[in-house]
Amino acid sequence: MSHLLYKITHAHLEKTPYFLDKNPISVYDPCCGSGSLLLQFARNNYSYQFYGQEKNPLNYDLARMNMFLHGVDFSNFNIRCEDTLLNPKHAKEGAIRHGFDIIVSNPPFSYGKDIKGGWYKKEKKLLELDERFRMVGALAPSSKADLAFILHMCDLLSHYGMCASVIANGALYRANSEAKIREYLIKRDFVDCVIALPNDLFFGTTIPASIIILRKNKFKECEKNNVLLIDASKLFERKDTKNQLNDTHIAKILEAYALRQAIENFCYLKTKEELQTNGYNLSVPSSIEEQEKINIKDLNLELEEIIKTQNLKRSFLDNLINELERGY
């Protein structure tokens, strides 16, 4: 999965003229864990600037150690240990005053459900005024911070940048404040693509998730005012005790994303208006099923035509048989 996130975002860097001469490129992970996503970029791009934040002190130490072990110079990474949502450590200032070029992350699913007071604890009133959330007019549910992380990343994304993040499927279709957050993102045309992933892909859980891709500036007309939905939930191979995406699966997803055209039972485009009609639902499987629903009215018309044709043929055969019988 981390390789897919890297491939999607790195392809964006390669095809966007703005980044061809930009140096350094900034890469950020707000829930960096041991740094595995950042290292996907570090392996071939030592000159990039890497930024991360991690709440767990042990993972924070591992992330810094991994950077050193993989040859990333101390001056090329800035990883901080603190709660990303309550105390973000990377403000838009200095070298990153325009935001990050690439943001990749795999935030914890339904963060806040095991915390007394939820993810925002006693800071709800303060967070409602936070620039990351106040434009929406709603906070993510206290027990489900999935879209709070998405808004945090969106706020720190540069004008030409791309964010690709794993997200729990429930955040793509649940109502109330989460629907309001999705409405905010869709109306501003920030959501570029949603990719439904297979189940049993992540360690520690078997539930399926998706990847959501955000962009603040869509260059081509065909990219504007719509969202590409890709159903990759059946693309996997079983390896050891987990499902995995192999190179063929990743190539198929990347090709569909690059083409941005409807492919039967795999992907299609949904306009802002269609999404609005459906409560700003970004769930890929339910949208695919919706496309495949049988139109009873059309089906009845087809059946009537078939019956009419059969009756005409039957009448012709009856007349032919009568003629033959009279002949004998």
Image (spheres, grey):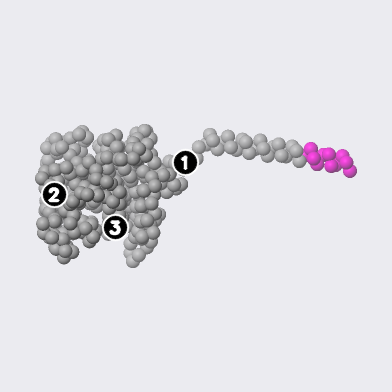
Q: Earlier in the sequence, mark 3 or mark 1?
A: 3
Q: Earlier in the sequence, mark 2 or mark 3?
A: 3
**Residue at 27%, 56% in the rendered image:** 2
Magenta span: 318-328
Relative image position of residue 101 (x, y in whole percent): 21, 47
The mark tally for this picture is 3
Drawn side of residue 113 relative to residue 264, left or right: left
**Residue at 13%, 49% in the rendered image:** 83
Q: Which residue is mark 3?
A: 3
Relative image position of residue 10 (x, y in whole percent): 27, 53
Q: Decide whether residue 319 is among the magenta residues.
A: yes
Q: Secondary structure at mark 2?
A: loop
Question: Label 2 to label 1, Cα distance in Å?
Answer: 44 Å
Question: Label 2 to label 3, Cα distance in Å?
Answer: 26 Å
Residue 180's place in the image compared with 46, above or below, is: above
Eye-nearest disc, 2 or 3? 3
Residue 51: mark in rendering: none
Q: Using the rendered view, name the quadrant where residue 183 is placed.
A: top left
Relative image position of residue 243 (x, y in whole percent): 35, 60
Q: Which amino acid type is shown beneath numbered disc 3? A: His
Classed neighbour count for the residue bearing mark 2: other residues with Cα under 10 Å, few (<14), some (14–19), many (≥20): some
Q: Secondary structure at mark 1?
A: loop
